[in-house]
Image: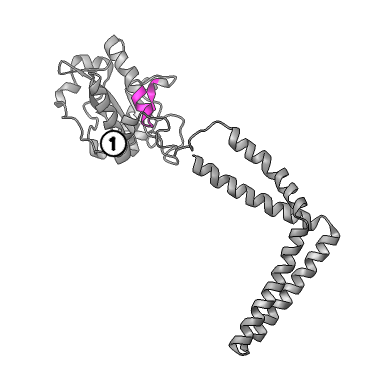
Amino acid sequence: MQESNGLLFTLVTAYALIIAIGGWLVLDSRRRQSFQQQLERFGVNLAQTFAGAGNSFGQGAQRTRGRFYKAFGTVSRTLESHKWQLLLAVLILVVPVAASLLLQPSRALRAYDDFPQNGDPVILALLRGEQLSPPPPLPPEAFVTREVEAVRQNLAGASREWMLLDADFRQRLLTVFHLMAQKGYAMALLEGYRSPERQSYLASLGSSVTNAGAYQSFHQYGLAADSAFIRGGKLVISEKDPWAMEGYRLYGEYAESVGLVWGGRWKMMDFGHVELRKAGTINRKHGN
């Protein structure tokens, strides 16, 4: 951050110097005319230098040096004779900027929107390091038991294929699963990618299931997933179970720490739902 501030200060100072010199030259007619004459003389000297380039090398080199020294010397003397006015103008412009840079609290540059901005170092290391593998899948019958059907229907036709998920989203979700396992919560993917046809079917069941039609959910783009917990080899989905509710709380914290959106914060709460919102994917307030 200090290096960034130093570069910014240098750029602002250079800009202020240009403004100061420009103002000093433009606002005073006498100085403006004098500077214009100096530029004209400089142009004439420069033209004469190139015009005489065909002469002998030794004489041409001497004349070239002499004319350049004369032209730049004129400008240098002019600036030297007004150095205090220039210094005052620069200070007036630079001091407020320098004070604001030095006195503002130090803070890091803003990260990209789709990457965690305040993540735990362990979480960030997992995201940038080893590519995690999906957990072993539960048998299909685990998703159609009486207990599961009581709280979540239509899971028999849901896709739980991890490789159909967006690669970035998949790695973030697996990171959350890994962290949850360290807290004693084994997790299972209930549904990941969802076809447009299945999305339309679920939407036809009413708002208690989903408000999103086809291509209005991040599921269609492999950027959303619904998950639940495993206890004693069985799925635990309902948040009415205190153990599960505590798990969902942790799940939401970890999901948000890796840059995911957690459905537990929505008006129609969906504790097991997370998604990765990528700009331009869909134009909806909430995927589901």
Q: Is residue 59 left or right of residue 206?
A: right
Residue at 54%, 44% in the rendered image:
6
Q: Secondary structure at mark 1?
A: helix
Residue 163 lies in quadrant: top left
Residue 158 within the segment the image draws in magenta: no
Amino acid type, residue under disc 1 in the picture: Gln
The answer to whether residue 23 is above or below residue 164 is below
Query: Which percent across, then down, holds residue 242?
Result: 29, 9
At 19% from the left and 22% from the top, the residue drawn is 143
Query: Between residues 37 and 267, which one lies in front from this camera angle?
Result: 37
In the rendered image, is residue 241 in sight?
A: no
- Please tell me in which quadrant of the rendered image residue 154 appears: top left
Q: Quick check: can you spot residue 35? A: yes
Residue at x 33%, y 27% (from the top left corner) = 202
Q: Position of residue 145 (x, y in %)?
A: 18, 18
The magenta stretch is 253-264
Q: Residues within 10 Å of mark 1 (few under 14, many from 20)?
A: many
Question: Is-magenta flag for residue 263?
Answer: yes
Q: Is residue 46 left or right of residue 198?
A: right
Is 52 situated above or below 224? below
**In the depicted view, which residue is nearer to us: 155 or 122?**
122
Locate residue 230, reporting x and y percent.
20, 19
Residue at mark 1: 171
